[in-house]
C-alpha cells in the first residue's frame, strides 16, 4: 500500500461517477487543479456517493499499487465521503486524516464445485434464492458454533460496513479499531433467540449450506454475487488494507461512533 503523501506536489488522479452532479464537479476541478492519469497517481480524488466509493475501492484492490483515496460527496448519502468543496483541495488533502480499512476475503464453492474468490469492503452476505428458508451451519476457526441456522440469510460485516446492510438487519455498529467483525442473521427463525455474534477479526468464519439444492443460497461480496453456493469461508485480509482520507472534523471512525447515538 502506498503511504500517506503530504507534499504540495502530490500526483493526484481524479475519478467521478456518471451522475450529473459528479460530472459537473469533475469539470470544475479539472479547470482549477492539475491531475494525472490513474496509473501515475499517488492519491485518488473520487467524486460520487458511497456506491461509487465502493466501486473505486474495488478498482484499487485490483491494482498492484493501492493509492489513498479522498472522496467528496456528489451522491446521496455520502457516509464514506467528505463534504464537496472546490476550494483548497490541495490543503485539505495534505491535512486529511488517514483511516485504514481492511477488506474481507470471501472464498465460495458452488454446488458444482466451482471456486470463486471475491473481496468485500462492507460485508459478505448469504441470501436464500427461493421461498424456502436457508439452512446454514456456522463454524468459527473450524469449530461448529451453530449446527443449523434457519433464516433468510446471514452476513459478516466489517466495522466500515457495520452501519450499512448489517445495521438494517439489526446488527451492531463496530468502531473501526475494534478488531471485530459482526456475524448477523437475516430474519432468523431458529435458533429463535440468537441475534448474532461479535467475532475477533483474526478468526475464519465458515458457512455451510445444509441443503443447497432444495434450499439454494447465493453469496454476495458487496455487489458481486455467486449463485447456488455450498460453502463460504470469510476472513479479514490485512495484506490488502486500503486507506481512506478524511477531513479531520469528519473522520470515518468518529462518524461510525456517533451513529450509535442516531435516532
Image (cartoon, grey):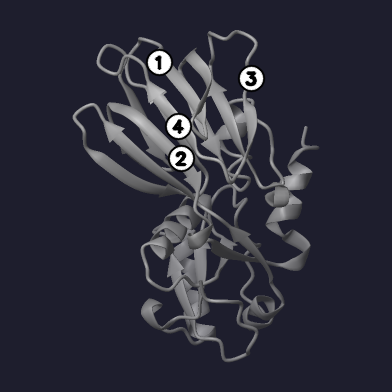
Give the mark toward the camera: 1 or 4: 4
Relative horizontal placement of residue 47, taking residue 216 as reference (left or right): right
The label shown at residue 195 is 3
**Left or right: where 107 falls relative to 246:** left
Between 58 and 247, the one lying in front of the other is 58
Circle 2 SS class: strand
Q: Nearer the viewer, mark 4 or mark 3?
A: 4
According to the image, label 4 marks what residue? 206
**Of callouts 1 and 4, the N-terminal one:** 1
Residue 20 place in picture, x, y as percent:
44, 59
Where disc 4 sits, the SS reads strand
Compared with residue 179, is residue 90 higher up or lower down, i.e. above or below? below
CA separation in Å, label 2 and label 1: 18 Å
Residues at marks 1 and 4, CA–CA distance in whole angstroms:
15 Å
Q: Secondary structure at mark 1?
A: strand
Query: Which residue corresponds to the image point at 36% horizontal and 9% vertical from the top-left?
Result: 132
Tell me the residue at 19%/29% (across/down). 112
Rendering coords of residue 207 (x, y %): 43, 28
- Image: 181 above or below 231: below
Q: Considering only order in the chain, which callout, 3 or 1, is on the residue closer to the N terminus?
A: 1
Q: Which mark is residue 234?
A: 2
Q: CA distance from mark 1 to mark 3?
A: 16 Å
Q: Which mark is in front, 2 or 1?
A: 2
Q: Are marks 1 and 4 in contact (CB under 8 Å)?
A: no
Q: Earlier in the sequence, mark 2 or mark 3?
A: 3
Whole-percent x, y for residue 70 in the image:
58, 68
Q: Which class describes the residues within 10 Å of circle 4: few (<14), some (14-19), or many (20+)?
A: many
Q: Is residue 106 above or below residue 132?
A: below
Report the Cα–Cα distance between label 4 and label 2.
6 Å
Number of other residues with Cα within 10 Å of mark 2, as a class: few under 14, some 14 to 19, many 20 or more: many
Amino acid at each position: 500500500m502506498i503511504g500517506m503523501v503530504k507534499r504540495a506536489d502530490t500526483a493526484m488522479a481524479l475519478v467521478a461517477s456518471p451522475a450529473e452532479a459528479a460530472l459537473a464537479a469533475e469539470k470544475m476541478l479539472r479547470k482549477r487543479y492539475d491531475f494525472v492519469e490513474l496509473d501515475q497517481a499517488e492519491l485518488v480524488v473520487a467524486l460520487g456517493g458511497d456506491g461509487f466509493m465502493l466501486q473505486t475501492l474495488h478498482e484499487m484492490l485490483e491494482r498492484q499499487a493501492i493509492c489513498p483515496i479522498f472522496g467528496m460527496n456528489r451522491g446521496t448519502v455520502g457516509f464514506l465521503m467528505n463534504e464537496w468543496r472546490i476550494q483548497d483541495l490541495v490543503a485539505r488533502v495534505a491535512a486529511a486524516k488517514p483511516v485504514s480499512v481492511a477488506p474481507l476475503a470471501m472464498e465460495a464453492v458452488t454446488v458444482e464445485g466451482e471456486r470463486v474468490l471475491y473481496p468485500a469492503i462492507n460485508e459478505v452476505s448469504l441470501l436464500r434464492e427461493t421461498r424456502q428458508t436457508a439452512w446454514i451451519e456456522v463454524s468459527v476457526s473450524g469449530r461448529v458454533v451453530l449446527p443449523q441456522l434457519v433464516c433468510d440469510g446471514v452476513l459478516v460485516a466489517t466495522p466500515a460496513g457495520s452501519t450499512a446492510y448489517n445495521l438494517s438487519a439489526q446488527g451492531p455498529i463496530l468502531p473501526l479499531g475494534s478488531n471485530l467483525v459482526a456475524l448477523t442473521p437475516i430474519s432468523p427463525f431458529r435458533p429463535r433467540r440468537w441475534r448474532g455474534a461479535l467475532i475477533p477479526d483474526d478468526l475464519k468464519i465458515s458457512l455451510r449450506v445444509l441443503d443447497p439444492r432444495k434450499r439454494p443460497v447465493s453469496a454476495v461480496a458487496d455487489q458481486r454475487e455467486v449463485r447456488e453456493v455450498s460453502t463460504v469461508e470469510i476472513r479479514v485480509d490485512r495484506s490488502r488494507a486500503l486507506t481512506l482520507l478524511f477531513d479531520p472534523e469528519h473522520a470515518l471512525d468518529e462518524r461510525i461512533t456517533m451513529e450509535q447515538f442516531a435516532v
